[in-house]
């Protein structure tokens, strides 16, 4: 069982927006935005449905980062 360091507060990842150069905000796991019940689903099951081929086999957790300035979103795969 792998543990995401961002989900569990062990590490922060700081990104700069490639569009405007402002700091981006971490908004949580991308699969939590799929529907009303997805935040409550088993993480490994959601990784099989997230359309990112490397998340389950590569022990990566997809996180959404958003720019508060220009509203650009980016998904970053965090190594667990």
Image (cartoon, helix red, strand yellow):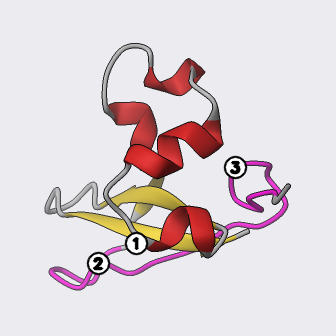
Between marks 3 and 2 in the image, the one whose residue lies nearer the viewer: 3
Residue 21 image-quadrant placement: bottom left
- The residue shown at (67%, 69%) is 59
Closer to the chain start, of discs 3 and 2, is 3
In the rendered structure, the answer to whether residue 26 lies left or right of residue 7 reads: left
- Contact between marks 1 and 3 (CB within 8 A): the answer is no
| Residue 28 seen in render | no
Q: Marks 2 and 1, how far apart in space? A: 6 Å
Residue 57 place in picture, x, y as percent = 60, 70
In the rendered structure, the answer to whether residue 41 lies left or right of residue 8 reads: left
Residue 40 image-quadrant placement: top right
- The residue shown at (51%, 50%) is 47
Q: Marks 3 and 2, how far apart in space? A: 21 Å
Closer to the chain start, of discs 1 and 3, is 3
Nearer to the camera, 19 or 76: 76
Q: Please say if 20 is above or below 27.
A: below
Report crowding for label 1: few under 14, some 14 to 19, many 20 or more residues within 10 A (C-alpha): some
In the rendered structure, the answer to whether residue 2 lies left or right of residue 41 reads: right
Residue 4 place in picture, x, y as percent = 73, 59
Residue 50 place in picture, x, y as percent = 37, 50
- The residue shown at (21%, 60%) is 69
Q: Which residue is mark 2?
A: 17
In the rendered structure, the answer to whether residue 1 lies left or right of residue 17 reads: right
Nearer to the camera, 16 or 44: 44
Which disc number belongs to residue 7?
3
Q: Which residue is mark 1?
A: 23
Secondary structure beneath label 1 = loop
Between marks 1 and 3 in the image, the one whose residue lies nearer the viewer: 3
Q: Please say if 9 is above or below 46.
A: below
- Classified by dominant secondary structure, the portion drawn in magenta counts as loop
Residue 65 place in picture, x, y as percent = 39, 60
Q: Which residues are magenta?
A: 3-22
């Amino acid at each position: 069982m792998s543990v995401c360091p961002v989900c569990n507060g062990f590490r922060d990842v700081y990104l700069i927006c490639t569009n405007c150069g402002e700091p981006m905000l971490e908004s949580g796991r991308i699969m939590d935005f799929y529907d009303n019940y997805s935040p409550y689903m088993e993480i490994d099951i959601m990784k099989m449905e997230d359309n990112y081929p490397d998340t389950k086999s590569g022990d990566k957790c997809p996180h959404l980062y958003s720019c508060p300035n220009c509203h650009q979103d980016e998904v970053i795969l965090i190594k667990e």
